[in-house]
Image (tube, coloured by chain):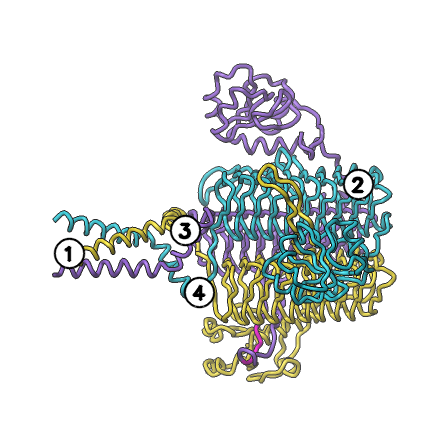
Chain colours: A purple, B yellow, C cyan
């Protein structure tokens, strides 16, 4: 068992389908207590089949039961003595059951405020909330039911946290931001820092240049809808005049930067190390790959997919998959290619010259 | 009004020009209390025109007054009944007024040390400083006038913070670093962590290799001049032997990495997710785009602009704009291009062969 | 002297070789007290020669002694009156001496638990450990001998910290993770946050799409071996079912993202801003450049080098250097090249047409 798990109780397959749906093919009284991949699962474990690649493993698995789709069930009818739970989406089912096992195994957090926390007297904390050590909550904040603030979290003035929000250690939420119900923010993330805006106030050129950058105050906030999850050390800037908007069920990985005044459409997922410059509008159900860069003031339609490490400099108005990254190859080969790319205009000119020479010949 | 703002008082245009300069064309007694874009501003709001694109909006705006340059003022002379403040740099003027409105609306921070802060007895904290909850300040640190340390900030041994420095929550400053007057550091940023330096001490090759990496102690610090602003979760490493230097009025966005022994010249701006490797020397007034990577031990002249996601592997000795990023296009089209790039030498060879064939023909 | 250093004591060259090895050529009684580059060192300083580029500086240096390899010693035999310590690896020797000087100059940390720290009563803290202000340690954690937890560190349930671990301020370690002996983690890093895993549970297409992302619980942890160093604000995700593995003596720079279920082989170094997606297996002794992106579910052989900003989308099964980044050039030139790259298929078609035309001619 992985070092992060703890022994839990077992439940019957009958109890599982009562709670999560699906149909049983096999022994409804069989008990399972944790999850494992098909090739590693034992009799007290539940496995799942979500990828055709692993279909042969169903023939040999020792799992106590297997989550399987109706179509795949037909393919493995021959497998005798194996219990199945048949469900349209085995992977999602697996995820829900896994969460339930964790909830069983995790000591329940005791509601209350740790004595070392510093809560402004103006703040009303729900009795069901769990406020950890060294947490700070400033004036006017609103803390919903069952909110969990882990050690070192800092909540600014007037922040509103919906029910069941969970902020992991050392998260900072700047003043005025709103987080909807069930929002999860991982450790070290920063919500609502100032957007990057400075007015140039310089006179003269070159060495004679004088003046300075003047900070543009960032008066908006960040408005995060329900069921959003935000990764560790990710940063989402507050808006300059209006708010930065993260719509419902957006999922953002670690070390992502989202600039001021962006809007990220509902259900969009953004992988690690991506950066989105200010005032950009990303549609719903988009998939932004790891380390993707998106310029400011552009719009992405719904259902746009940008592959890892690509750069988006203009609006993408149609759904579809977009790319601009090269895969790494042998260094020497690449250097040859890179040099030719820098001189592509010369290759083109040589083609032109050849065409002209051939044309001339044709004319002779 | 955006969720981050709070109602403030209003002031007359006459008071504005007394404080910030400019000339009034219109009713000097008109009162404004906040700022808004031209198309959204109402009679108690101040708007600005900094981009010719928005010139038509001046004809229709309901703003109480508009900040405008002398040249643009002439273009909209016809607009009757609208109040103007004429100033050479409306955008910078706007920024300064916006800050003033925020200062009016923000409850003043009460000087003092929060009882939960842990301050070494050797540290002299100015009576005007505001030290938040769960702040730690180690021995020998110097805290200037009106310094603001938000909750969870950690200040190492011997750190020097100039007057009016503001460190947002959970910022860490390692021992020995210096921050000049008015430096702002956003939440989670780390100033003065160890530079990435290890001496290889290995013997043998392949599977027979033994030995280890030996850490190079990082004995320098980070020296940050006045008026620098540093974004959330950005990291600036301490020098190996000498200091890492950030000159005056440099502006650095979120999630930027600056390696040990770098020098960033005055007034340079660095956008989010950029990474600058060690011992690199960036000139004054440079603009480094988002997610740009700059190799170690290179020098960038003053006034160099590197566009977003580009990579700099050699010194750039002349001012100008540099690029190496491709914009994302349709995935299938890109894959075709990428395959051809990897085989550019073959295309070139085919051109050579054609040239040779034609030459031969000419010789016949 | 750099602002981060403090005056230390001096020791003789004889004492140095007693402690660190090597042979003296010169005055064994000469005393040095700090380190400096060849061109800046004075008589009480130790310099080193690790790069042939600096060989001429040995002729003119004022250093009290120079660390030098046997081969280089022969090249500078002529230099009279200069003291040498001859050692096979001057750079590693330098690193070890530098650390010793720092240890001499640094006030020893006093073991004990800061009164503001919050330690669960179930946790046994070694008497030799140094627990700083506002540290939180949750139930079941194990804290080894001489462990140093700086201010604001948060240690989750059941975390195991080996002897001599040093966590800098505001580091978060999630529940169940293990850190081996002498592991160093810099400020703001997050170890063991949830991996980025969500099962799509949607029905319908386009505007009619309904459903949600279902979180995949992350039940693994992070298992970090001895002598690993991790940079500031780096994030290493816990595994989904099994653990994420960081093997011995891996060195990771700042702002690096390592996804769930990765394995990073021993002695591998990863430079700043790199991102490694989930379930990827990196070999031993690899060197991953700055801002490199590596896709999920790929394998890199031992001794693979990936140059800065390159993207790896497939497994690299042989040792060697791999690249896919372009160096930035003049913006206008680049735009020309970039346009040609997007139309490379047209250039290829023109070459084909030329070849066909020439073939036809040959046939006539």
Q: Report the predominant secondary structure element of the magenta stretch.
A: strand
On the question of residue B256 being in view, the answer is: no
- Residues flagged by tags 2 and 4 on a common chain: yes
Label 2, label 4: how many angstroms apart (C-alpha)?
54 Å
- Residues flagged by tags 3 and 4 on a common chain: no
Q: Position of residue B188 (x, y in %)?
A: 68, 56
- Disc 3: CA contacts within 10 A as few (<14), some (14-19) or many (>=20): few
Verify whether residue A203 appears in magenta.
yes
Q: Position of residue A237 (x, y in %)?
A: 61, 58
Secondary structure beneath label 3: loop
Label 3, label 4: how many angstroms apart (C-alpha)?
28 Å
State which mark lies toward you, 3 or 2.
2
Left or right of C260 on screen, residue C125? right
Label 1, label 4: how many angstroms apart (C-alpha)?
45 Å
- Which of the pair C339/A21 is nearer the observer? C339
- Disc 2: CA contacts within 10 A as few (<14), some (14-19) or many (>=20): many
Label 1, label 2: how many angstroms apart (C-alpha)?
87 Å
* Count of marks placed on residues: 4
Left or right of A217 on screen, residue C99? right
The residue located at (73%, 54%) in the rendering is: A154
Secondary structure beneath label 2: strand
State which mark lies toward you, 3 or 1.
1
- Which of the pair C299/A184 is nearer the observer? C299
Residue at which label 2 appears: C143
Q: Chain of mark 4?
A: C
Residue at which label 4 appears: C331
Residue at which label 1 appears: B364
The region drawn magenta spans: A199-204
Q: Earlier in the sequence, mark 2 or mark 4?
A: 2
- Residues flagged by tags 3 and 2 on a common chain: no
Q: Which mark is residue A318?
A: 3
The residue located at (85%, 59%) in the rendering is: B120
């Amino acid at each position: 068992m992985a070092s992060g798990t703890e022994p839990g109780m077992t439940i019957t397959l009958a109890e599982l389908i009562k709670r999560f749906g699906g149909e049983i093919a096999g022994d409804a009284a069989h008990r399972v207590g944790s999850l494992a991949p098909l090739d590693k699962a034992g009799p007290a474990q539940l496995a799942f089949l979500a990828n055709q690649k692993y279909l042969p493993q169903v023939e040999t698995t020792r799992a106590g039961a297997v989550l399987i789709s109706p179509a795949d069930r037909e393919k493995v009818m021959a497998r005798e003595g194996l219990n199945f739970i048949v469900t349209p989406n085995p992977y999602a089912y697996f995820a829900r059951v896994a969460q339930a096992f964790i909830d069983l195994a995790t000591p329940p957090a005791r509601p209350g405020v740790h004595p070392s926390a510093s809560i402004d007297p103006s703040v009303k904390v729900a009795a069901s909330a769990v406020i950890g050590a060294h947490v700070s909550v400033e004036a006017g904040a609103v803390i919903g039911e069952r909110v969990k603030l882990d050690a070192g979290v800092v909540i600014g003035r007037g922040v509103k946290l919906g029910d069941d929000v969970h902020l992991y250690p050392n998260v900072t939420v700047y003043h005025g931001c709103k987080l909807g119900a069930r929002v999860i923010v991982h450790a070290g993330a920063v919500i609502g820092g100032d957007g990057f805006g400075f007015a140039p106030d310089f006179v003269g050129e070159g060495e004679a240049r004088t003046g300075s950058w003047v900070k543009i105050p960032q008066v908006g906030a960040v408005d995060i809808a329900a069921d959003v999850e935000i990764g560790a050390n990710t940063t989402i800037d507050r808006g300059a005049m209006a708010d930065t908007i993260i719509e419902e069920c957006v999922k953002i990985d670690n070390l992502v930067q989202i600039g001021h005044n962006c809007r990220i459409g509902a259900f969009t997922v953004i992988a690690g190390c991506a950066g989105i410059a200010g005032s950009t509008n990303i549609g719903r159900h988009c998939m932004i790959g790891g380390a993707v860069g998106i310029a400011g003031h552009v719009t992405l339609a719904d259902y746009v997919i940008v592959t890892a490490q690509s750069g988006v400099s203009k609006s993408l108005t149609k759904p579809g998959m977009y790319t601009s990254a090269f895969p790494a190859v042998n260094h020497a080969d690449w250097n040859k290619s890179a040099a030719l790319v820098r001189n592509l205009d010369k290759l083109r000119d040589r083609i032109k010259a050849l065409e002209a020479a051939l044309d001339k010949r044709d004319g002779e």
